[in-house]
Image (cartoon, rainbow, N blue to C red):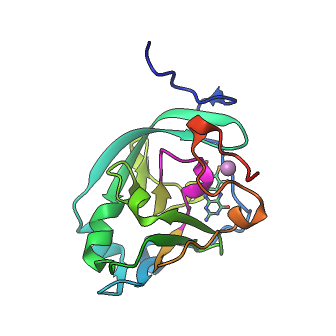
Amino acid sequence: MDQPRIPPGQTLTTGLPVLDLGLRPDLRPENWSLALFGLVEQELRLDWDHFQSLPREARCSDFHCVTHWSRLDAQWEGVAAKTLIALARPLADARFVTLHGADGYTTNLPLEALLDPDVLLADGLDGGPLADAHGGPVRLVVPRRYAWKSAKWLVGLEFHAEDRPGYWEVRGYHNDADPWKEERYAE
Ligand SMILES: Nc1nc2c(c(=O)[nH]1)N[C@H]1C(S)=C(S)[C@@H](COP(=O)(O)O)O[C@H]1N2
Ligand SMILES: [Mo]
């Protein structure tokens, strides 16, 4: 039998709802930059022009929010996280990453999860530029995890040896967030 498209406990939505802490940062391409720092050989700060010069990818993927909506077939465009990470060259003991949003939001993932080719730093959605409401100019997209791992208004990737729970993870959300295992909340 085919794998179902909608994980357990989820309901299909069309379009993409907007969900965040409500602290919209004023980010435009001109004042956006992305820092890669912590346990890396080469700390980096990329501006918009540098980001635009990197090899681009398009990925169609499904987006599952822990609040029970799923949006199928979102068309994301941008740069693979692994392309950016290769520029910074993580040190051998860098096993975890904190993703920083310009609204002060954080979330955490193992470095290995970010090397999945489906993980993008997206600046495009459904054929247009990524709207501010959805985290533009650049957000993370991690299709294999609940959407709270997909940090909007992405401005920093911080590499560490130990795992550091992010905004929702310290408030009781599951550390791993696999929608197929319904990893919504910590035990
Ligand atoms: N910076 C930042 N990223 C964030 C959030 C946030 O509050 N701030 N909320 C997360 C949550 S809970 C969800 S469901 C998705 C929603 O993305 P959307 O508004 O583009 O649908 O963004 C995630 N990324
Ligand atoms: Mo969410």
Q: Residue at x 48, y 44 (%)?
A: 144
Q: 47 or 36: which is nearer to us? A: 36
Q: Residue at x 65, y 75 (%)?
A: 104
Q: Is residue 68 above or below residue 27?
A: above
- Magenta portion: prevailing SS class: loop
Q: Is residue 66 magenta?
A: no
Please state, as top left, top right, bottom left or bottom right, where the N terminus lies in the image.
top left
Q: Residue at x 30, y 86 (%)?
A: 41
Side (left or right) of 114 relative to 109? left
The residue range painted magenta reads 142-153
Q: Position of residue 50 (x, y in %)?
A: 28, 75
Q: Is residue 8 above or below residue 143?
A: above
Looking at the image, the residue that sits furthest to the top is 1
Side (left or right) of 159 relative to 179? left
Q: Is residue 122 visible?
A: no
Q: Classify the position of ligand 1 by quadrant: top left, top right, bottom left or bottom right.
A: bottom right
Q: Position of residue 158 (x, y in %)?
A: 48, 78
Q: Is residue 147 magenta?
A: yes
Side (left or right) of 128 relative to 178? left
Q: 98 or 131: which is nearer to us? A: 98
Q: Position of residue 151 (x, y in %)?
A: 56, 61
Q: Residue at x 73, y 42 (%)?
A: 67
Side (left or right) of 134 relative to 140? right
Q: Position of residue 164 (x, y in %)?
A: 60, 73
Q: 19 or 160: which is nearer to us? A: 160
Q: Is residue 69 above or below residue 39?
A: above
Quarter of the rendering containing residue 39: bottom left
Q: Is residue 100 visible?
A: yes
